[in-house]
Image: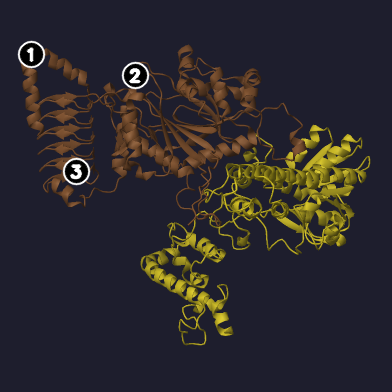
Chain colours: A yellow, B brown
Amino acid sequence: MTQTAIAQTPTKSSNARQSLNPNPDGGPKSQKQMSKAERRDLQERQRAAKAAAKASVPSTPAAKSNTTPTGVTAKGAAQSPASAAKKSGKTADGKPVKGEQEDTSHLHTHAQVDDTTRGLRIFSHFGLPKSPSVTKGDVHPAIIRVGLQFSDFKITGADARCIAMLTAFKAVIQDYVTPPNTTLSRHLMTHLSPQINHLVLARPMSVTMGNAIRQLKLEISGSDIDLPEQDAKNALCSKIDNYIRDRIVIADQVIQETAGKKIKDGDVILTYARSSVVQKVLLHAWEDGKRFSAIVVDSRPMLEGKAILKALTAASIPCTYLLLPSLPSVLPHATTLFVGAHSIHANGAVFSRAGTATVAMMAKLHNVPVVVCCETYKWSETVRWDSFSKNELAPTPFPSSASSNCHSSRHNPDIKTSHNLSVLCPLYDLTPPSYITAVVTEVGVIPPSSMSSIPAALGRTIGA
Amino acid sequence: MEFSIAPLRPVTREFLAIVLAGFGNELVPLSGDLGNQPCPKALLPISNKPMIDYVLSWIEKSGIKGQGTRPFTVLSDPLARPLRCYLDVLLICPPSHRPSISHFIYSESLASSPSLCIDLQTFDDSQGLSVGTCSVLRHFSSRIKEDFVILPCDFIPPPSLPLSKLLNKFRIETMSDGAIVTTCWFEPPSGKTTVPEEWGTNSQATPIVWDNSTGTLLYVDTLDNTDRNPEEVELRMSLLCRYPRTNMSSKLQDSHVYVCKRQVLGVLQQKGDFESLREDFFPWLCKLQYQKTRQLKYGNVLGNLEGSEPSSPDEGHEDPSVTGSLRVGIVIHRAKDGFCIRANDLPSYLEANRHFVDSASSYTLPSDPQMRSLIDAKASISPDSIIGDFTKVDERASIKKSVIGKHCVVGKMAKIVGCVILDHCVIADGAKLESSILGKNTRVGSKATLVHCVTQGGYEVKDNESYRNERLDITDWEAEADEEREEDDDEAFGDSDEESG
């Protein structure tokens, strides 16, 4: 069986070049002996071979034109590196085996080459954000709207997305009617599943959304079976409101107080991109009378720092704005770094906007304390060591920053993807625990090594 | 066996589609009466499909998917079907058109959009006065409880512009920005066909000003403004202050597709003197975006930002009195992206038919043997024609680039080039038709010649007559008939009956 495993391992191994022969030590296996996956692989290879045979006939003249570097037709070599990249980029699509494509890719003019994909050679599994155009099943209009806002990046940030999602769920719950022969506590969750799927299609789910949904499921399954329907729905809506109030709003207020204590007069506070929590901390500290100045570090393509800059300058806090590459020049002047987080993990790592890790690492080098402000509902019990396994890509064309109605497209020009250039913009990165000084949550100021004790601090056994 | 009654489910509708099927005054004489029966503009065929069919199938493609195939069947309860339509259609027509439109909707010819729930309502008005679309909307505002989409019956949407694109833009913008309307403007196809002036001029060039980066419609030049000041377009400084980089064009035409918030009806009630949506109301609405005094006056009616609190709740409470931007969004469709037209006057109607004839797949003889027998082997039908069912084409007839409806009779040696012929027409031997539009039941006598003509339904062209660039009304015919003596009238009737037989 191990032999077959080698023969069938996709695609990037050189064994795949002999892919027409499924069994490298000779003798094709009978179909009965092969497993389902193997049979499917064989079928696809045969299909691809047939198509290759068809394509090789008209493309032999194309092969000659491949030698000329200029003036290639659309079918010629111009697409070949792109198509090769696209083929290797496609993973679980069930498309023809890539090993074959490496042989014949420069001849392939497959209709399967999706012109809208970006042909990433690496990290293609980050996935392309697609807009949910087809609404399958019964998706509530409020969820459609929220999904559109997510996919358009009009609502960004873990907190904002979670609140928007929960507000939409309240509308869904209020419009829900229990079908006969079942109860609300059993059926409502199945009713909510397609709505959640729609949101996930718009943008992959964030940890905050996942935690909120888990909590909601708990509440739904625990709702009293004897309650009249409207009461049950009202109770659920009030529980959702309580969740938002307790875990987000009040948590933010506690964090403002706690983190505010770390800010003294004359401090220079460094912050990166836009975290709603950090923004609140700074504004609150300023209102409290502390007089400090702020440095906002920003990066393309999202340019979210502009939004926090606008808020801070509106409160007359003296600010400096710079892009990430010029960070080393201001670091000697900074006293503290405050960043927000998308999620915090059991091993103490912080998953946040791409660039945070760089800023944190440089701050550590310059002995600037790195303070992460984060509510406990962002805690995820998974352990993460790198940001490669799961991430997201910024959409193209790059979204204009949310707060501006002016023409930021002038400052943020679209990089046209040609066949020699593919743009890779991951949205998140992971800051290892060694770079973090402290995490400020509503249960206290925690060093990264004891992040796994957060659920215990909240009074729960597992999970948040 | 257990029968349980499926409970009445509340229909959470997101949009209501309102299709306005007017008289079609620009399409006279085509939309004139055929005897006693009116020919509604909505049912005039384009490439043998009634105009309104295009709009209805466009609506259907955008929203109602959940009722047909349902991949997410409710697991535990097969009887419970939530009636969740995103779109429902309210079709408004004049009372005289109601029977024919109702017949069309509920017959099998609407097989293309089976799952639309269409509600047909009439608006009482007399044909003479063109009652403005504003009054129609005001009249029905009690039926409209949610956000709505206004559509004309004569819009031929391009395949590359789905209605869901407009709906999505509206959804995003109302939530994030407080926009109130989303409109669609398109570039009409450059007229490749020469159209005689008697058919009416294509004077629909309204200059508009819009902002490209945010997709906001800023200013629409109305007829009042052109009357007041034909040389200049006056723009307010507040407009330019808010949107310093704008585009201006007079090539675009309004598609009359408006996606609006419910609160817009409230403002419409207040402005009682507006007549037409396209000409009065929406250009006025565009001004709300940048005129502060008007914003204050109407801002509370239009409502604050509803449900658009993307940031945490306490941030949203900072400015409770801030109204939304009250923007009017715009989606622009360029001619190169697809064919798009509003077939509300004769040149556009002909152009729409021409387009479908050009892009239709080549004509093949009908497969039904009975229908095929009606078409003579010696008739020469060019591949870019469309011929309806049960049409009889005699030998040596030559048909090029035309659309011919059902149950027509084309006589021998007839030459038809570039025409649009509706159902039940009879064209006698030797007739020559060029670039004409014949209404239903028209009879063309033998050896008659019609060039660039439009006939009303039921018109009879006598033998050997020749018309050029004319709109032929039944009143003309009756006027001529009155001149002759009554006996001649009877004879003429008798003759034409024999001919048509």
Q: Does residue B105 sit above or below A226 in this rendering?
A: above
Amino acid, disc 2: Gln
Name the residue at the front extreme. Answer: B1
Q: Is residue A45 visible?
A: yes
Location of residue B481 in the rendering, given as x and y in whole percent from the top left corner: 13, 17
Q: Which residue is mark 3?
A: B390
Residue in front for this viewpoint, A26 or B309: B309
Place residue A399 in its image quadrant. Answer: top right
Q: Which residue is mark 1?
A: B485
Secondary element under disc 2, as helix, strand or loop, is loop
Q: Does residue A19 sit above or below A239 in this rendering?
A: below
Check contact, mark 1 vs mark 3: CB within 8 A.
no
Query: Which chain contains the residue that carries disc 1?
Result: B
Q: Residue at x 18, y 36 (%)?
A: B416
Location of residue B349 in the rendering, given as x and y in whole percent from the top left corner: 32, 32
Q: Does residue A326 sit above or below B132 in this rendering?
A: below
Check contact, mark 3 vs mark 2: CB within 8 A.
no
Q: Which residue is mark 2?
A: B127
